Image: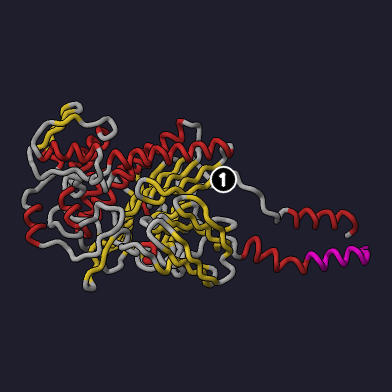
Amino acid sequence: MMTRADCVVVALALALLPYLYFTYWGSSTQGEEVRIMVGGKEQMAISLRQDRRLTIAGALGVNIIDIHDGKARFTTSPCRGKQCIYTGWLGRGGESAACLPNRVSMVVVGREQRFDSVVF
Amino acid sequence: MGKFGVIMLALLLSACAKREEPLHQQQLLTFGTLVEISIWGADKSLAQQASSQVGEDLQQMHNDWHAWHDSPLVRMNQALSAGAPVTVPASILPLVQKSITLSRASEGMFNPAVGRLIKLWGFEQDDLPSGPPPDPAAIAALTKQHPGMDDLILDGSQLRSTNPAVQLDFGAIAKGYGVDLAIARLRELGIQNAIINAGGNLRAIGKHGERPWRIGIRNPRGEGVLASIETRGDESILTSGDYERFFEYQGKRYHHIIDPRSGYPATGVISVTVIADDAATADAASTALFVAGPQRWHEIAKKLGITQVMLIDDKGRMVVTPAMAKRIRFEADPPPKVTVAPL
């Protein structure tokens, strides 16, 4: 026979399910945050959940990194080749991009990495 | 339900909590590229120590094998163009030996003797050229001298060239070979499960705990990941693509994989992915198959002993070998149309 307390616990557990699904399973391979490094040293780790524009000073000048809709990308760069910009949006855990001349790099980190590493 | 039910529920819910993985991941800017090191299951301090050791090793290799800054390779190239015999430094000798073998097996499609051509295009530097492309007469003047690895005579560590146009540039093999040495270093330090990815030149050993390492292959046109491969034990997965290093001039794309025969960026292919036992072979082979193009890549792959290949041609058509078809999983939904072509 279920007591009132049992009912409360079961109701709470059921109410928690959608949260647990999305947090721990549903989007597990999507990136959670982007780690930005300058000269190979971690400068910051920023959540991908909030849209924002970051200005990162590197060896040559300034990189602008945009975060939008759970993804991050290099938007402007002081380098000649613009390879970092061509890499485009990064959204899944394990994806990374770098502006080598400016010595700025970033990697997307998810709770569960869809890929342990990406070749390009 | 009673107390037992409540306890079961609590246990179930607590199983959702995040567990710390014994995974050490580090990014380094060294070796002229972004190097990612992943180590599974090692003690934290050992993993950190091993990563920084690998970082130091790779930087040293970069200094030794640089084709343009003042380096042992530059001094060697000066002697070669003067026709003088030169003692190959110990750090460069294995690269020369491996390059001669792979260049021969690929019928010169992989040809590190065209350093002058690479320099003429400006692809030897860290930062990319912005154009214009070189003068056609200057390209023709270099290609008609046919510098090749067969022009080299290697006797022990003594090297000389019978063709003054030979200038060695190991851009299409050095990163792969460096990754091989880095993996050897990790093993020496007692690490059994790791990935080293130096600017897309990847070799993996062991596993990620109970599962294999999962490697993504970047989409050569557009963003994100095209396909993935789960590694088996010790192997290298490597792609050569026209999107890695290039410049655009007056609306035309000029990429870094120069066909030694024409002196211009190789045409007909946008990317080649290979799986091989070691990264040096995978690096040189992916370049060779790219240069060989849609008509001849099968033949060159056979000569190089490479059985796992995915090639995307300039029309976007994907071809995989049967051995690669068994390994690759396309990430796009719906999956792209792929042709399986026997070697």
Residue A48 can be seen, yes or no: yes
Looking at numbered disc 1 in the image, what kind of residue is underneath it?
A: Leu
Q: Is residue B76 above or below residue B15?
A: above
Residue at point 34%, 62% (across, down): A79
Q: Which residues are magenta?
A: A1-13
| Residue B181 position within the rendered picture, expressed as x and y whole percent measured from the top left | 37, 37
Left or right of A25 in this view: B208? left
The spot of residue A58 in percent (x, y) is 43, 58
Residue corresponding to mark 1: B23
Specify whether residue B228 is in view. no
Up-down relation of residue B38 to residue B270 (above or below): above
> Which residue occupies 56% across, 58% down?
A45
Q: Residues within 10 Å of mark 1 (few under 14, many from 20)?
A: some
Among the 4 quarters of the image, the one containing residue A9? bottom right
Residue B307, given in percent of the width and then of the height, sits at: 31, 48
Q: Is residue B14 above or below residue B160?
A: below
